[in-house]
Amino acid sequence: MQRAKSFGMTPPPPVADHILVVDDDPDIRELMIAQLEREAVTIRSASSVAEVYAELAEEPADVVVLDLNLPDGDGLNLCRELRAQGFANAIIMVTARDSAVDRVLGLELGADDYLTKPFEPRELVARVRNLVKRIGAGEPERPRTARFASFGPWKLDLLQRRLVTSDGRLVILSSAEFRVLSRMVEAPNEVMSREALLPERKATVAFDRSIDLCISRLRQKLGAEPGGSELILTVRNEGYALAADVAYA
């Protein structure tokens, strides 16, 4: 599918040359394509494993948005096979499966990111943008087998979605706290707007205080360790930044 021409206001330039959307549900495919159409010069779609191989043989993809339930195979196996064959570009898994086991398997088999249905379509757009930006800039990616992201005195457990102190104590995070902190971890030492931190609330986040309350709770939790309260900086009229380098293990 070629990106449609637009008239009037000039849209932002696409971040990718080619995105491949893979889902056997035509309605979901069209929904994702509609959300992503400004992010790539070309968006193609596939509904099966066979079609994925045919599309990639015709033209490589910068990003593959991959559903796990396909009529002729499993997306987890397909992800593993693509990596084994040398496919090095981004893979984002999108699935109705909501178990920790599936998330772990997906990331261990080579996925760069994982979204669970139902999801806010704008979050998919934000994930695609972040991945393409990171890969295109040549910045170090999170190792696909990484379990922990270490910053300051803390470790963020990327699978169990909780904080871990240097002596192994656990600090539980809410879903919103984990999403915000994990996005900051993916872009350390960079200022992130409220919309980037909570893309699922993009339409209202500028007018409510949910992000500020979430940041306040995170600061309280991070402040339980020496130096932790200084990790999240407020940049006036711009957003927030994680003031720390990040290492993965």
Image (cartoon, helix red, strand yellow):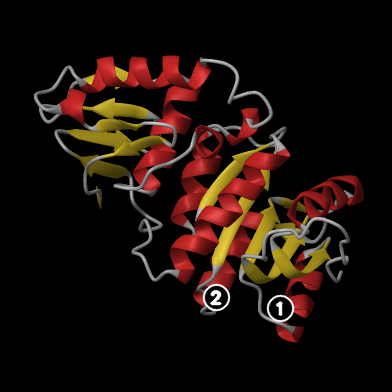
On the question of residue 249 being in view, the answer is no
Q: Which mark is residue 56?
A: 1
Answer left or right for 33 relative to 207: right
Q: Which mark is residue 94?
A: none
Instruction: Please tell me whether residue 38 is drawn above or below residue 226 in the rendered image.
Output: below
Residue contact between numbered discs 1 and 2, judged by CB atoms under 8 Å: yes
Q: Secondary structure at mark 1?
A: helix
Percent across and percent down for residue 51 are: 81, 71
Percent across and percent down for residue 166 are: 12, 31
Whichever of labels 1 and 2 marks the residue nearer the N terminus, that label is: 1
Percent across and percent down for residue 205 are: 59, 25
Instruction: Please tell me whether residue 33 is drawn above or below residue 211 in the rendered image.
Output: below
The residue most toward the bottom is 58
Q: Which residue is label 2 attached to?
A: 87
Residue drawn 72% across and 84% down?
57
Count of numbered tags: 2
31 or 76, nearer to the observer: 31
On the question of residue 211 being in view, the answer is yes
Residue 22 falls in image quadrant:
bottom right
Tell me if mark 1 has few (under 14), some (14-19) or many (20+) residues whose alpha carbon lies within 10 angstroms of its own.
some
Residue drawn 68% across and 41% down?
122
Percent across and percent down for residue 165 are: 17, 27
Q: Secondary structure at mark 2?
A: loop
State how far apart marks 1 and 2 are (Cα): 10 Å
Tell me if mark 2 has few (under 14), some (14-19) or many (20+) residues whose alpha carbon lies within 10 angstroms of its own.
some
Mark 2: amino acid: Phe
Answer left or right for 1 relative to 55: right
